Structure formats: structure tokens, C-alpha cells
Amino acid sequence: MRDLGVNILFEGLNMQRLLEGLWITTRIALISISFSIVFGIITGLFMLSNNKIVRLFSRFYLEMMRIVPILVWLFIFYFGVTKIVPVHLSSELVCVIVFVMWGSAEMGDIVRGAISSLPIHQKESGIAIGLTELQIYTYIIIPQAIRRLIPGAINLATRMIKTTSLAVFIGVIEVLKVGQQIIEYSLLTYPTAPLWIYGFIFSLYFMICYPISVLARKLEMKWQH
Amino acid sequence: MVHNTQEALLEVKKLHKDYDGLTVLSDVSLSVKKGEVIVILGPSGCGKSTLLRCINGLEAIQSGKILLNKVDISGSDTQWHLIRQKIGMVFQSYDLFPHMTIIDNILLGPLKVQKRNKQEAREHAEKLLHRVGLIDKINAYPRQLSGGQKQRVAIVRALCMNPEVMLFDEVTAALDPEVVHEVLKVMLELANEGMTMVIVTHEMDFAKAVADKIVFMDQGEIKEIASPVDFFQEPSTERGKQFINMFNYNHLNKERE
């Protein structure tokens, strides 16, 4: 009986290493997403500022993150900046830094869109019953804005999870790299290795991203108005 | 209706407002006594909504004064969020907060701004909802209500703050004709109970029924102030006459066999 190709997944430490790689991917994504949400809200408020210069700078920041490929940012930081800065930055840390920069910019735009899509009369109704600016934001604007930005935010989160695979290029041994390594030394024994390994990694990404999408849809339905 | 003839509750003195270089309000002066109902009429763009918004501090003024209970509230150091508790405003677009239930909409002001006792505020809200016939909607969301119902809730929301004067900015303009009546009924009852009201409306019959004084505006100026009977029978200005005639189609009959 021929060796079933799928056995490669259970060979030796393969499964363990794949899951460790997955954990690194997840860790980078989680940390980046968390910080991006926080900084994204701040960036979004800057984008809505009354000050023209503040708005201009935040707009420029967003465009830089969108125009320059993330991979190039990773290279600039890992191979370029780390040479100037005296502190040693691990490749995982560089990855998180670049991702947070990117995520904050995108999240900022999502926040700006959500807040400015609210009818202006909502704010005026709050003003008319005597609420202070802070109270209007707390009770009226932010609760409604959160509902509106969930779809975009979830989409950004899944994009960030997928983009972690770029970390391979600056030396992070995340799940995709682990998969490549396993394939490299197993190819002779398991000719169908790529199919099973990449297939498995495919399902891992799916298992992480799909529940998030479902959660987002559920929230959207619940808040339908 | 007993009016205190000396004290004016709300006074507007020589208000002047520009917007983008255009004069929107010019030398506008108005005096509202406690318990009076003023209806402001005028063609589109005459500045009546803007005047209301200036009184509530939603628009800045270039010169002039606004006095509430003899206190100047138009200075630059005015704490508007305190003043606005005394001035209730209802808008054409009602704008209830869609993510909150009706009762939460109504209680947001009393609880967060006026810091009232929860029990007392809730009882007050329920009493008002009973009066407008919407107590069964107390836990509903705005999307479940019709336009007329939402507008009545908006009025309750403003009333629950115990304002001294209520401003109404074309509150029935966006409603279907059948439901306009239910909202105007509420306003009429409010007037009969002695609430001081400044109303901007296009409903002429309602204006005739509820107003103590008609203020006719055109192009940012007050042209006439008269009793409803006087104004609707015989306006003293030419512009006033033209305005009244706009609602009269007798001379424009379609030709029929």
C-alpha cells in the first residue's frame, strides 16, 4: 500500500511545528490588531479634526501606508532602520511595528468614515437636550459609530491575519515558513507533500478568519436599524 | 390665558447674523411673555429656522442680544449646555437616537444632564408618554415607530427636561398629512396648559388656532407682528398680503368644462 500523502501531517514533529508556527502568526496578528484598534481610533479623530494641518498629515500618513507595499515597509524597517537604531529589533517585533502602523492608518479611515456617516442632526439633538460634547460622543456618537465600523474593522483584521505571511521575508518562522521547511525535506518521501501541507495551512487560516466573519455578521444583524 | 404683562420670559434684541457674507437675520427683535405662543410665518429662506437656532445657541450671532429671564445668554462665555436645559427644541427630523429604546431616549437628558433621581425621572417620562398616547411603545426602538409617533416622542423627550420655553422648528413638515394632526393636537394641549412656545410652521390653520401672536418674517427681517385674526384677515404689509395669497388658489382655478 502506498503511503497516504496525508500522513506527512502526522510525521514526527510536523504537526507540533505547524501549530507553533500558527501560534506565532496568531500572536503577531492579535497584538497588531489590538494596538491598531487603539491607535486607529486616535488616528480617526485626527482625521476629523478641525485643524487643516492635522487632517493633512493624517491623510498623508494613510496614503503612505496604502501606496507603499507592506513588504517594502517590512524591508525598510528590518534591513534599514534596524541598522541605524542602536537597539536590536527582532523580526517579529519589526513585523508588529509595521503592522500597527498600517492597521492604525486603515482603522483610522474606517473610524473617520463611521463617524462622518452619522446624520448631523444626531449631534444637534444631543446638543438640544443639554449634553456636553463629551456626553454626546459617549452616549450618541460612539455607540452608533461602533456599529458602523464593525464590518470594515473585521475585514481589516482578516486582511492583517493573511498578510502575516509576509513576515517570512524578514525571517519570522510563522506557519507558512514552517510548511515550506517541512515540504523541502519531505519532498522525496512524500511527493504530494505540498498539497497536504498547504491544504492544511489553508484550512488553518480559514479556521481563524471564518469565525471572525461570522461574528461580524451576527453583530450586524443584531444592531440592524 | 393669563399673561404676566410685565415680565418677558424670552427676549431677542436687534439680532444680526451673517453667513458666508450674506445677511441672514437683520435687526430682529422679539419679546415672548411667559405662557405666550408665538408662531413665526414666512416664505422659505426668510430666516425663521435660523432665528430659532440662534435662540438655542446652535448658530452664532454677529450682534444683538438674547435674554432668558432677563439674563443675557448670547455672550461668548455662555454655558450653553446649562441654558439648553431651559430651552426645549424639537426639530423637523425628530432624530431620536436609533440605538436606544424610547424610554432611554427620553431619560438620557434628565439622568445624564440634570442628574435627577432615576425613579422620579422615569415616572415623569411615563406620565408624559401616557399623555401623548404612546405608553405602550415605551420599550420599543425608534425604527418600530411611525413618523408621527417619533415626533411625539421627540416632543416628550424635550418636555421631560422641564424647559421654560419650547421651540418647534417645522415639526410636521416631514410627516404624512394624516399624522400631522396627532402631533399638532399635542402641541395645542401644551399651549392650553400654559407652556411658552415659539413655533415655526407652514400649517396655517394650526397657526390660526394656537397663536397668541403671529410674527411674519421675510428676507431676514420681521415685517409684521399681529394677532392671528388681524394677520390672516388683513395683513398690514404688502409682503404679508402676498404671503397669505400664496395659500389661496381661488384665482388660479384649472379650466374645466
Image (spheres, rainbow, N blue to C red):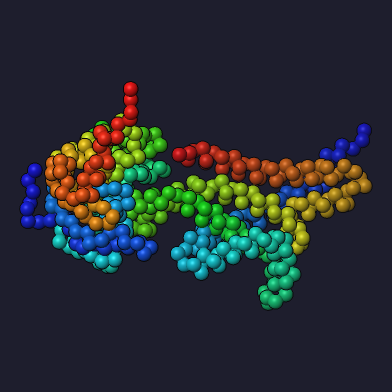
Please name the residue shown 48% across and 60% down the image: A48
Q: Does residue A10 appear in this view?
A: no
The correct choice, above or below, for A197 with respect to B64 in the image is: above
Q: Nearer the viewer, residue B95 or A203?
A: B95
Q: How many marks?
A: 0
Q: Quadrant of residue A136?
A: bottom left
Identify the residue at image location x=74%, y=44%.
Answer: A202
Q: Position of residue A135 (x, y in %)?
A: 36, 55
Q: Which quarter of the figure is the C terminus of chain B placed in?
A: top left
Q: Position of residue B248 (x, y in %)?
A: 25, 37
Of A215 and B69, nearer the camera is B69
B11 sits to left or right of B59: left
* Residue A114 visible in rendering: yes
Residue B239: x percent and y percent? 23, 49
Q: Residue at x 71, y 68 (%)?
A: A76
- B185 shown above or below B234: above
Answer with left or right where residue A129 lies relative to residue A86. Answer: left
**In front: A9, or B16?**
B16
The relative height of residue B72 versus residue A137 in the rendered view (above or below) is below
Residue B176: image x %, image y %?
Answer: 34, 34
At horizontal 38% and vertical 52% (from top left) the residue drawn is A123
Quadrant the N terminus of chain B occupies:
top left
> Which residue in the rendered view is the most extreme toward the top?
B257
